[in-house]
């Protein structure tokens, strides 16, 4: 959105009421001025902020405040709007605001669409669900402006949100949010209760994958109800001075008086455990709020506690189960090793069970093939993320299982995903380490980096350098942030959206998060086909520069990118293209310390085990197995 008026009376900084937030791309300034003038003639005020290149770091908070305090959000829908990152960010905030409004005012109308270009509703994403005012024909502009203005009588506007932040939507019941964690629960409980351990754990996952629920479930486990004292500490409820003091934090975690001297604290904890006759475990939530220095200090003191409790000869022990979005602060063997437990997305079986439970609760029965189709739709639209699955189940209940094919649309995906992305993922809490602040330009550079990286299942420094050279949006964002490539790489390494722990020399975005962000950044099939085609070209170049098994990794990624491109552009040509590519790449492998036979066996095994590649090729006719065989035995012509 750009300024449309020199009238500062509508600026939020003046304290004036804001009636309408007008969202549009820079290229559409003329039509935006026309719309604004018509609405202002009726006495409506239009939210106004200065160009982002001149406004500085407050721009995002100004936009958020403007949308939160608006009575209506008006989109000037054009192809330029659909391409604009700023416009998409504004739309995401508006969708979040609308969700909050509809929770209490089901019939309220907050988002309004003025279509000023030739755009089929199916290509407009979530905006395709709204009743448009069509102004594409300039001859009908006056009549359409009057139609738009008629939507905003004073008694038809929603009230502005007077809270500092829009509240999240009501949380569904826990049993609908998190399922099938029993294997992980048993793994941790077995470690805690076994004298040999492990007694120190780090549960790591991006936001809303169930870390807090997991800790609380552990705290109520029957095997910890006897012989154990369980303490739950949520760092989000403690002030920064406690979170920054390892000694004060340790005393809080084990219920020791704050008056105990620092050099006596670990001994006092050991005495307390010995005299109680109970082992103690602290469940530490929101551990990402600790700085690296504090986390290291805490691990050092916990190691002292471990040794001193062991010296009591009671067979008791102290234990820790920390939950964090990151693992940077907890890595390493010394001063105390923590066993890592990454929480993953829910798989197909979990989603199917959730649907079975909902159907049984609602007294519904479906033929097996219908049920499988619906489960596949739910899995696709939620990507197995607990937060999105909960929303989807609520939607199915409200819609009474009617027209479930809507779950396959981009618009319905955005209804579920955009608030989650805007509120949880592309935020300072996820993109920055604990306690760090950064201007909006730095956060935008990170968001742009994730935009170019989400088509890849893994990425290296070379991937990022390639896109910095070829992508103007990323290059401009990096320049605005005054960052070099090394700065961006380091910042990405500390974000909470990566898969952790990492066991390879490259980095990976958490699988479900990657797929959700990919569909958020690339909204049409043509955009997705284009980015995968370009990624395919780069990955082949990258693979040719590798040796050993890294060649094979690059080969499989080439096949995956090519399969997705074909599925989006020409599925009938997929088998011919993939078999030709598989033979060519296999014949191009180079023997190093590993023989060609070993490399090809490794490649065939990797192909057979690749679930995402299997989904991309649609393996109902055995294409995945044929690709593996071609890689094993690539003899014959490539033509």
Image (cartoon, rainbow, N blue to C red):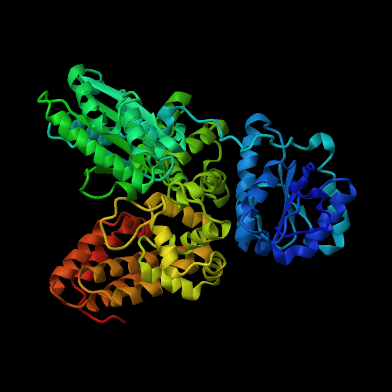
Q: Residue 557 occupies which quadrant of the picture? A: bottom left
Return the residue nearer the eye: 623 or 209. Answer: 209
- Whether residue 291 appears in this view of the structure is yes
- Whether residue 352 appears in this view of the structure is no
Return the residue nearer the eye: 261 or 230. Answer: 261
**Residue depicted at 44% across the width and 69% down the height:** 485
The picture places residue 136, in percent across and down from the top left corner, at 77, 61
The picture places residue 20, in percent across and down from the top left corner, at 77, 46
**Compared to 37, does 79 lie above or below?**
below
**Compared to 182, does 472 lie above or below?**
below
- Asked if residue 182 lies left or right of residue 449, the reply is left
Q: Residue 588 occupies which quadrant of the picture? A: bottom left
- Asked if residue 178 lies left or right of residue 148, the reply is left
Q: Residue 312 occupies which quadrant of the picture? A: top left
Return the residue nearer the eye: 505 or 142. Answer: 505
**Number of marks in the rendered image:** 0
Check the picture and name the quadrant holding the C terminus.
bottom left
The picture places residue 264, in percent across and down from the top left corner, at 25, 30
**Residue depicted at 63% across the width and 49% down the height:** 61
The picture places residue 587, in percent across and down from the top left corner, at 23, 78
The outermost residue toward the right is: 41
């Amino acid at each position: 959105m750009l300024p449309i008026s020199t009238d500062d009376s509508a600026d939020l900084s003046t304290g004036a009421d804001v009636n309408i937030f007008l969202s549009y791309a820079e290229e559409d300034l003329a039509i935006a001025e026309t719309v604004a003038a018509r609405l202002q003639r009726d006495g409506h005020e239009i939210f106004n902020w200065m160009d982002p290149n001149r406004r500085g770091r407050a721009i995002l908070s100004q936009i958020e405040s403007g949308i939160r305090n608006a009575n209506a959000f008006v989109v000037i829908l054009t192809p330029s709007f659909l391409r604009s990152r700023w416009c998409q960010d504004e739309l995401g905030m508006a969708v979040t605001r609308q969700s909050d409004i509809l929770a209490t005012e089901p019939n309220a109308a907050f988002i309004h669409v003025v279509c000023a270009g030739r755009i089929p509703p199916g290509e407009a994403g979530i905006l395709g669900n709204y009743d448009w005012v069509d102004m594409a024909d300039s001859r009908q502009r006056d009549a359409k402006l009057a139609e738009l203005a008629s939507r905003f009588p004073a008694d038809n506007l929603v009230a502005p949100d007077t809270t500092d932040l829009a509240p999240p939507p009501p949380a569904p019941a826990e049993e609908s949010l998190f399922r099938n964690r029993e294997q992980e629960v048993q793994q941790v409980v077995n470690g805690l209760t076994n004298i040999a351990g492990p007694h120190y754990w780090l549960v790591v996952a991006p936001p809303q994958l169930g870390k807090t629920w997991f800790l609380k479930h552990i705290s109520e486990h029957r095997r910890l109800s006897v012989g154990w004292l369980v303490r739950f500490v949520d760092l989000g409820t403690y002030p920064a001075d406690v979170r920054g003091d390892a000694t004060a934090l340790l005393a809080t975690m084990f219920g020791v008086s704050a008056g105990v001297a620092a050099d006596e604290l670990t001994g006092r904890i050991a005495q307390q455990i010995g005299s109680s006759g109970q082992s103690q475990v602290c469940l530490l939530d929101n551990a990402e709020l600790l700085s690296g220095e504090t986390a290291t200090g805490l691990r050092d003191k916990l190691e002292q506690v471990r040794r001193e409790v062991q010296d009591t000869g009671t067979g008791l022990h102290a234990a820790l189960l920390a939950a964090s979005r990151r693992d940077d602060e907890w890595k390493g063997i010394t001063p105390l090793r923590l066993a890592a437990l990454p929480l993953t997305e829910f798989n197909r079986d979990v989603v199917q069970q959730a649907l079975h439970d909902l159907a049984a609760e609602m007294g519904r029965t479906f033929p097996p093939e219908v049920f499988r189709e619906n489960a596949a739709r739910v899995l696709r639209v939620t990507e197995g993320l607990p937060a999105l699955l909960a929303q989807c189940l609520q939607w199915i209940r409200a819609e009474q299982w009617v027209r479930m094919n809507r779950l396959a649309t981009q618009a319905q995906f955005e209804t579920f995903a955009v608030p989650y992305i805007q509120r949880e993922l592309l935020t300072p809490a996820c993109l920055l380490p604990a306690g760090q602040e950064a201007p909006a330009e730095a956060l935008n550079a990170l968001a742009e980096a994730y935009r170019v990286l989400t088509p890849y299942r893994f990425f290296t420094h070379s991937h990022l350098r390639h896109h910095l050279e070829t992508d103007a949006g990323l290059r401009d964002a990096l320049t605005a942030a005054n960052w070099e490539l090394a700065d961006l790489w380091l910042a990405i390494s500390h974000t909470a959206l990566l898969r952790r722990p990492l066991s390879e020399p490259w980095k990976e975005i958490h699988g479900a998060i990657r797929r959700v962000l990919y569909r958020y950044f690339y909204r049409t099939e043509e955009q997705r086909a284009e980015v995968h085609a370009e990624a395919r070209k780069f990955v082949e170049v990258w693979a040719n520069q590798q040796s050993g098994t890294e060649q094979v990794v690059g080969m499989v990624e080439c096949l995956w990118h090519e399969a997705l491109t074909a599925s989006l552009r020409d599925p009938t040509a997929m088998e011919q293209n993939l078999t030709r590519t598989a033979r060519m790449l296999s014949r191009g492998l180079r023997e190093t310390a590993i023989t060609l036979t070993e490399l090809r066996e490794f490649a065939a095994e990797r192909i057979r085990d690749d679930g995402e590649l299997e989904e991309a090729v649609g393996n109902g006719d055995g294409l995945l197995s044929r690709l593996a065989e071609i890689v094993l035995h690539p003899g014959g012509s490539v033509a």
